[in-house]
Image (tube, grey):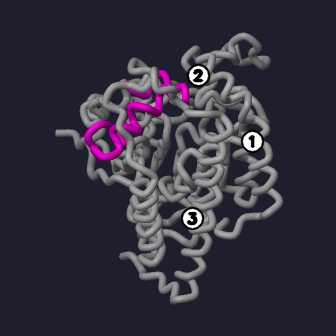
Amino acid sequence: MTQTNRLGPAGRVAYAAGQAARVAWYFGQYALAARLSGPAVPAQRRPAGAATPDTRAVLAALRALMERDLANIEAGYYRMPHDLVPAPGRVLADAAAFFADLPAVARRRRERSGTEVRRAPPPGSERLPAYYRRNFHFQTDGYLSTRSARLYDHQVEVLFGGGADAMRRQALVPIHRHLAGRHRAACRLLDVAAGTGRFLTFVKDNHPRLETTALDLSHAYLAEARRRLAPWARSSRTVVAAAEAMPLPDVSQDVVTCIYLFHELPRRVRPLVAAEIARVLKPDGIAVFVDSLQHGDDPAMDGLLRLFPVAFHEPYYAEYTTADLPALFAGAGLRVCGTELAFLSKVMVLAKNRLP
């Protein structure tokens, strides 16, 4: 049973002030980046039907997300964000690195160059799947360098106006419910495509004894994940592997999370990943899926979904937005137990189909 976390007026004020500052900081950088780089998509390249919500509507949706985040904290589903007051030096350094890299990102966007990493690949990257060897978001080095790993989360927060972490934290609600009454140290959670481990820091902050595995294809990003998860090193591990071929035992995980992966997978790979999630999940376990909205989820945002793959080099995104996800997961033996929308993301809870 969920216990109410009574923050009190001071706690609510602290949260509101911290998140307001966060949104202003990242939304401001988004606006400045757009001014410095020009429009992300020139008028002649705008897809048909790509009318987008105005800034007021986006900020209203973002405010609703933050109100939901605070309500979850007060309901006891998870703690106040561990970095509500971030280190000023790191925040400023990340912003400086972001703007230093911006001209290169803008150049790739103008040139529509999304496979630069293939022309000068880091050692060992030739063994990675071709679909992965791309400059997703037109970012420098794709997912293949330490520099990219250090900058990635800042870039994502700028893209979402400071709302990325709050969207990720919505996955903590079904995790809390599933683990309630269980001995955390005896449970295991796998984060598929864990990247820099950002989401797992929220998991561990709330469930420090839970055994977690961060799985990702990028050595550089997992090195960043290990750095971030160092306070919980005894109950955390990392695995370099593809999501479609996980080197993990069958029925070994109580919870599997998969956050912002499927929109970066080709259509042929998604069923393979879904099957692997089902394979490693225990019969009574859950999978928590967080990814982009799809067309029709929130019609007011459909224009943004049409613009996004053009503006940020997401070659598999357009097809993802029309994919039948319940049917995809059903083919792997997983059923959808619940779906909720959170700003520009959707959260789905999946369970294994019961055998007849």
Residue 231 is one of the magenta-drawn residues: no
First to last magenta residue range? 293-318
Identify the disc placed on residue 99.
1
User: Residue at the location (83% across, 60% down)?
Assistant: 89
- Asked which quadrant contains residue 305, the reply is top left
Residue 160 point in image, percent of width and height: 53, 49
Answer left or right for 1 relative to 132: left
User: Which numbered disc, 2 or 3, marks the residue that appears first in the sequence?
Assistant: 2
- Looking at the image, the residue that sits furthest to the left is 356
Quarter of the figure that contains the N terminus: bottom left
User: Which numbered disc, 2 or 1, marks the residue that appears first in the sequence?
Assistant: 1
Residue that numbered label 2 is attached to: 132
Amino acid at pointer 2:
Tyr
Comparing 43 with 85, the one in front is: 43
User: Which numbered disc, 3 or 1, marks the residue that appears first in the sequence?
Assistant: 1
Amino acid at pointer 3:
His
- How far is the residue under mark 3 from the one under mark 1? 35 Å
User: Residue at the location (16% across, 39% down)?
Assistant: 356
User: Residue at the location (22% across, 39% down)?
Assistant: 355
- How far is the residue under mark 2 from the one under mark 1? 25 Å
Residue 123 point in image, percent of width and height: 79, 17
